């Protein structure tokens, strides 16, 4: 099994779990309580976190896309999805925080492609 070396820099805003109606994934639409909020979101926290679907788990869901994207590219894609949600609800405070992670991963990917960094494991980005 392929696992991410990096931690996804989730800032626990809960927006993705409040807008699952926007997800293209069938499993998410099935958990929609009717207003876009996941039935498992309790007090802005996932109540089934340890057993949440693969589609809610960046590390595990990467396996499906590992033949297309590097780990850092996959994380950047998901960061951009978070930023899209944050922009939609106008949360500039969250956008500022997530944009920092976006820049770090953009820089890392650019450095990797220019051979400045050759081993992904040399990067230590934590939320
Ligand atoms: S929208 Fe992004 S940052 Fe916010 S809880 Fe979901 S994964 Fe984490
Ligand atoms: S199962 Fe948990 S992580 Fe997945 S959308 Fe629902 S509350 Fe969010």
Image (cartoon, rainbow, N blue to C red):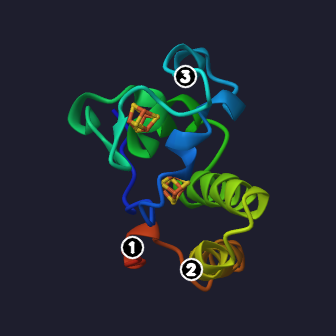
Instruction: Determine whether the beta carbon of the residue marked 1 sits less than 8 angstroms from the nearest atom of ligand 1.
Output: no
Please say if the residues under marks 3 and 1 sit with CB atoms less than 8 Å apart. no
- At x 46% / y 71%, what residue is drawn? 119
Q: Residues within 10 Å of mark 3 (few under 14, many from 20)?
A: some
Q: Earlier in the sequence, mark 3 or mark 1?
A: 3
Q: Nearer the viewer, mark 3 or mark 1?
A: 3
Q: Nearer the viewer, mark 1 or mark 2?
A: 2
Please say if the residues under marks 2 and 3 sit with CB atoms less than 8 Å apart. no
Relative vertical location of residue 77 with respect to residue 109 in this rendering, above or below: above
The tag on residue 97 is: 2
**Spatial separation of the CA atoms under disc 2 and disc 3:** 27 Å
Relative vertical location of residue 26 with respect to residue 50 in this rendering, above or below: above
Relative vertical location of residue 93 with respect to residue 24 in this rendering, above or below: below
**Spatial separation of the CA atoms under disc 3 and disc 1:** 28 Å
Residue 124 x, y percent position in the rendering? 37, 78
The tag on residue 30 is: none
Q: Is the C terminus in the top left, top right, bottom left or bottom right quadrant?
A: bottom left
Residue 61 x, y percent position in the rendering? 47, 34
**Residue identifier under label 3:** 32
Q: Provide the secondary structure element on which disc 1 rests.
A: loop
- At x 44% / y 59%, what residue is drawn? 8
Instruction: Determine whether the beta carbon of the residue marked 2 sits less than 8 angstroms from the nearest atom of ligand 1.
Output: no
Residue 17 x, y percent position in the rendering? 50, 41
**Residue identifier under label 1:** 127
**Spatial separation of the CA atoms under disc 1 and disc 2:** 10 Å
Q: Residues within 10 Å of mark 1 (few under 14, many from 20)?
A: few
């Amino acid at each position: 099994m392929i696992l991410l070396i990096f931690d996804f820099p989730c800032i626990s805003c809960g927006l993705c779990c409040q807008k699952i109606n926007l997800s293209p994934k069938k499993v998410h639409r099935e958990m929609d309580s009717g207003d876009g909020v996941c039935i498992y979101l309790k007090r802005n926290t996932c109540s089934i976190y340890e057993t949440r679907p693969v589609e809610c788990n960046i590390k595990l869901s990467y396996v499906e896309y590992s033949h297309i994207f590097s780990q850092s590219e996959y994380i950047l894609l998901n960061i951009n999805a978070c930023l899209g949600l944050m922009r939609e609800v106008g949360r500039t405070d969250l956008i500022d925080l997530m944009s920092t992670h976006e820049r770090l991963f953009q820089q890392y990917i650019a450095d990797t492609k220019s051979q400045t960094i050759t081993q992904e494991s040399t990067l230590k980005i934590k939320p």
